[in-house]
Image (tube, helix red, strand yellow):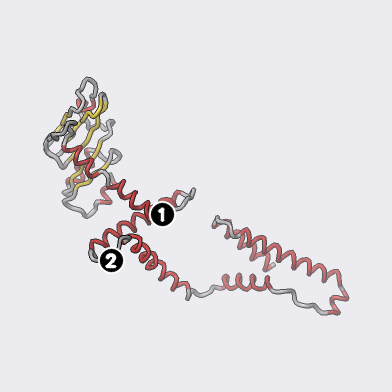
């Protein structure tokens, strides 16, 4: 209930269609205080349901039972034998039934007409999506937020600019391309002027010095202590090889592991 109340904040005069996860009598009354009506299926374990609406045995198929209050209507419809569905509506105030063979109540017809909004949104998002395979569930939620937000932005843009690219067939793809460029361009421009901090400069200098060849040593010193010269040469080669292995490991996708590898590489270079 809190989620839908937050989403509908500021709306007036609308109707909300929801499934049984959200629908309850208290929720309907809260929406009525905002001048918003509601139609939705109800779970059968709700305490506000009359026992007469829960009974499905010995009822005729396509039959309906209603419970009506001044501002709320409940209906129990039997589409199959011993199987009923219950809907709650604050939009309808009577028990009208259609003339079709299945004799569905008008409440159910209105619910079926509007319940496909979420399915349609999933279909539209699936056409152009930024979602990727990942085991990180916060990233899944974040990518879904981006998809839904971009779709909402496209709908609002079309309402504000109805003549925008009127002759194009793939308007949404073009809109997403322009949206992505508009979001990324300021960050690209800002990164050109980011000042190098002292730790960053230290890392750059350390990596640059690791790639330079060893400086020639004094011949007299080399002749005096050839063992120490060989030791320095071996130590320098080992250091370069260690740094190379660390940098290869730093390409791991795990950000925390990459940070550890880079810190280790810096430590080896400076020591």
Q: Secondary structure at mark 1?
A: helix
Left or right for 28, reference 252: left
Residue 147's place in the image compared with 89, above or below, is below
Could one spot residue 97 in this view of the protein? no
Circle nearer the N terminus (2, 1): 1
Residue 85's place in the image compared with 173, above or below, is above
Left or right for 106, reference 213: left
Residue 91's place in the image compared with 138, above or below, is above
User: Residue 196, how many percent across, how many down?
Assistant: 53, 74
User: Residue 233, how many percent across, how many down?
Assistant: 78, 69
Identified at 48% across, 50% down, the residue is 134
Could one spot residue 83 in this view of the protein? yes
Identified at 30% across, 48% down, the residue is 120
User: Residue 154, how many percent across, how many down?
Assistant: 30, 60
Left or right for 261, reference 52: right
Residue under pointer 2:
165
- Going by the picture, which residue comes out furthest to the right? 224
Rendered image quadrant of residue 268 = bottom right
Identified at 23% across, 61% down, the residue is 159
Q: Residues within 10 Å of mark 1 (few under 14, many from 20)?
A: some
- Going by the picture, which residue comes out furthest to the top? 58
Q: Tell me the distance, in whole angstroms, between the alpha carbons under discs 2 and 1.
A: 27 Å
User: Residue 155, how many percent across, how many down?
Assistant: 27, 58
Picture quarter with the C terminus: bottom right
Residue under pointer 1:
143
Q: Secondary structure at mark 2?
A: loop
Callout 2 touching callout 1 (CB < 8 Å): no
Residue closer to the observer: 106 or 48 = 106
Rendered image quadrant of residue 27 = top left
């Amino acid at each position: 209930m809190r989620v839908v109340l937050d989403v509908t904040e500021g709306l007036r005069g609308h109707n909300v269609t929801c499934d049984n996860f959200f629908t309850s009598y208290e929720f309907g009354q809260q929406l009525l205080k905002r001048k918003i009506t509601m139609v939705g299926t109800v779970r059968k374990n709700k305490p506000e349901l009359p026992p007469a609406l829960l009974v499905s045995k010995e009822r005729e198929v396509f039959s309906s039972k209603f419970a009506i209050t001044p501002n709320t209507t409940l209906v129990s419809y039997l589409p199959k034998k011993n199987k009923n569905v219950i809907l709650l509506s604050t939009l309808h105030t009577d028990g009208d039934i259609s003339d079709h063979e299945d004799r569905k109540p008008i409440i159910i017809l209105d619910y079926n007409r509007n319940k496909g909004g979420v399915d349609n949104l999933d279909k539209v998002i699936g056409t152009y999506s930024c979602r990727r395979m990942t085991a990180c569930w916060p990233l899944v939620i974040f990518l879904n937020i981006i998809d839904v937000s971009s779709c909402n932005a496209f709908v609002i843009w079309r309402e504000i600019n109805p003549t925008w690219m009127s002759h194009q067939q793939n308007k949404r793809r073009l809109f997403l391309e322009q949206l992505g460029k508009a979001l990324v361009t300021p960050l690209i421009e800002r990164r050109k002027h980011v000042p190098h901090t002292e730790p960053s400069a230290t890392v750059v200098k350390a990596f640059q010095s690791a790639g330079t060849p060893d400086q020639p040593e004094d011949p007299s010193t080399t002749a005096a202590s050839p063992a120490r010269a060989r030791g320095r040469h071996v130590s320098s080669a080992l250091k370069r090889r260690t740094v190379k292995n660390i940098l290869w490991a730093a390409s791991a996708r795990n950000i925390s592991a990459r940070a550890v590898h880079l810190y280790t590489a810096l430590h080896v270079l400076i020591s």
